[in-house]
Image: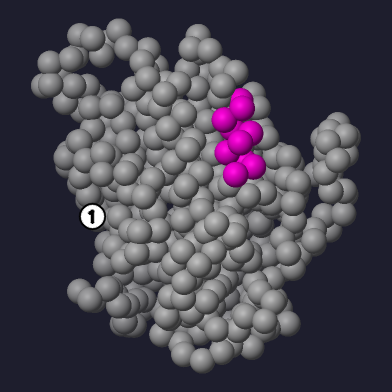
């Protein structure tokens, strides 16, 4: 509760502490954008204006310059946000949409127990309720009526649809209970196909790679366009990159619409808004294009993290922070008790200029790879025994340490033995993932009744 105490102190200085003590609990909005690397957001330094709504949040809130995702895969990453624990500390593990969150208190449960109306609107099949991410939500809208153009069983929906549902729900809420809303938008995730009125607004964005790329036969791999990303007759990486930027622009547009309605609804409650992404995207680094999940290198785990809260002034914070800090921070800002034994902590003290944590280190994971990030370096371990899907393999362990240079580039140095030891200890205490169950019969019925795609056809929806 230290963070809340500091926050109240700031409010006291501004002369509104008495009023604050009578303030109702804040409405809370958690926004997660899929596959959005921070350096493609204007507020984080991207040249073009891809993100006016996100930039507006940053201009009146706190922007964390160095936020590390708990995973470079969608479901594990969100499970860490919801529990305040690292990926190998919860039962989703590194299985993307094929494991179930069980036995750990969640953010939504805390809000629900505190009398909040809780609602989630998600847009990616790997976040469906069968993953257990719905625990604690009164409404969990995972009605996905579309599928990716190259993967028919990979269900999703566009920002316009998801935000439309969230707006309809919001319009039915009165002000008797505070709200906790999780809004997940999928669009920057490939294939990059922005709607017509956004396509061409950015145009090509040159990457370091020049010339056309072949299309790979698989969904992951180097030196080519992953099969799931293929756009008909497009082979120029600069065109893909431009479409990626336009998808960001499209999501940002609908996000802006929702934030406007949310703030109008919540006016008297001084809302809290936290925005992040589940992971980034490779755009040519190490020869990987338009994919994620294959490593936990910076392009895949450096994500935006922006928080707007009452009494908090706009500032940029360079300290290293993590997805596991999200649940502790939101509970603290709402004045609610912390979750039991979180690995993260409330960022509220940092947000009001308080003391920085001493030499913070944070974990990030994907299948077959784990990393420990420190302020200016990362150490990663790849190989044997790390994969929770395939079990032990004969592949030998490999490790490396990379240091961030002042120009932002990362260079290898001798492996940090102490960091390696901490990763090993972290991996040794890993919780085994709980396999996902069958879809609930009533949910299948509900989807069919609404005329959606046959949900039982989702046999191959793993992957990035
Ligand atoms: Zn994702």
Magenta stretch bounds: 160-169
| Identity of the residue furthest to the front in this view | 197
Q: Could you classify mark 1 by the number of other residues whose Cα lies within 10 Å: few (under 14), some (14-19), or many (20 or more)? A: few
> Of 429 and 402, which appears nearest the observer?
402
Residue 47: image location, x then y, percent = 31, 66
Residue 132: image location, x then y, percent = 68, 39
Q: Is residue 386 left or right of residue 32?
A: right
Residue 123: image location, x then y, percent = 64, 47
Residue 249: image location, x then y, percent = 46, 56
Which quarter of the image is occupied by the C terminus? Answer: bottom right
- Residue at 64% over, 88% down: 214
Which quarter of the image is occupied by the N terminus? Answer: top left
Q: Is residue 155 left or right of residue 221?
A: right
Examine the rendered structure and indicate whether residue 445 appears above or below residue 360: above
Q: Quadrant of residue 311?
A: top left
Label 1: which residue? 318
- Residue at 61% over, 25% down: 169
On whether residue 167 falls in the magenta region, the answer is: yes
- Residue at 27% over, 73% down: 408
Report how many numbered discs are placed on residues in the image.
Answer: 1
Circle 1 SS class: strand
Q: Quadrant of residue 385?
A: bottom right
């Amino acid at each position: 509760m230290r963070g809340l105490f500091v926050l109240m102190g700031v409010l006291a200085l501004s002369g509104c502490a008495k009023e604050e003590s009578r303030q109702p609990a804040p409405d809370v909005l958690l926004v997660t954008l899929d596959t959005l690397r921070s350096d493609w957001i204007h507020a984080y330094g991207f040249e073009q204006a891809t993100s006016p709504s996100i930039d507006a949040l940053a201009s009146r809130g706190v922007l964390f310059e160095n936020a590390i995702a708990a995973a470079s895969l969608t479901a594990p990453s969100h499970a860490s946000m919801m529990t305040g624990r690292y990926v190998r500390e919860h039962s989703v593990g590194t299985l993307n949409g094929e494991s179930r969150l069980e036995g750990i208190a969640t953010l939504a449960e805390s809000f629900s127990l505190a009398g909040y109306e809780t609602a989630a609107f998600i847009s990616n099949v790997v976040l469906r309720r069968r993953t257990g991410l719905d625990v604690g939500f009164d409404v969990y809208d995972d009605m996905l009526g579309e599928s990716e153009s190259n993967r028919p069983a990979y269900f999703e929906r566009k920002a316009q649809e998801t935000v439309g549902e969230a707006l309809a729900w919001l319009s039915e809420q009165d002000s008797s209970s505070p709200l906790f809303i999780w809004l997940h938008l999928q669009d920057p995730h490939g294939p990059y196909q922005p709607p017509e009125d956004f396509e061409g607004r950015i145009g090509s964005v040159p990457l370091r790679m020049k010339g056309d790329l072949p299309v790979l036969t698989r969904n992951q791999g180097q030196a080519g366009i992953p099969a799931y990303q293929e756009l008909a007759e497009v082979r120029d990486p600069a065109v893909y990159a431009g479409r990626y930027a336009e998808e960001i622009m499209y999501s940002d547009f609908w996000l802006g619409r929702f934030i406007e309605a949310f703030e109008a609804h919540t006016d008297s409650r001084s809302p809290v808004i936290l925005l992040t992404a589940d992971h980034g995207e490779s755009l040519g680094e190490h020869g990987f294009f338009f994919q994620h999940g294959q490593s936990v290198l910076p392009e895949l785990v450096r994500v935006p993290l922006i928080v707007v809260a009452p009494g908090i002034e706009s500032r940029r914070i360079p300290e290293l922070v993590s997805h596991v800090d999200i649940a502790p921070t939101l509970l603290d800002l709402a004045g609610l008790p912390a979750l039991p034994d979180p690995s993260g902590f409330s960022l509220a003290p940092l947000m009001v200029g308080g003391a920085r944590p001493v030499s913070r280190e944070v974990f990030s994971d994907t299948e077959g790879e784990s990393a420990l990030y420190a302020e200016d370096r990362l150490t990663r371990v790849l190989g044997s025994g790390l994969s929770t899907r395939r079990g032990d393999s004969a592949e030998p362990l490999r490790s490396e340490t990379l240091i961030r240079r002042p120009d932002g580039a990362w260079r290898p140095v001798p492996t940090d033995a102490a960091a390696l030891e901490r990763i090993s200890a972290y991996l040794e205490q890993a919780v085994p993932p709980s396999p996902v169950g069958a879809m609930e019969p009533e949910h299948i019925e509900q989807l069919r009744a609404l005329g959606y795609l046959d949900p039982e056809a989702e046999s191959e929806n793993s992957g990035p």
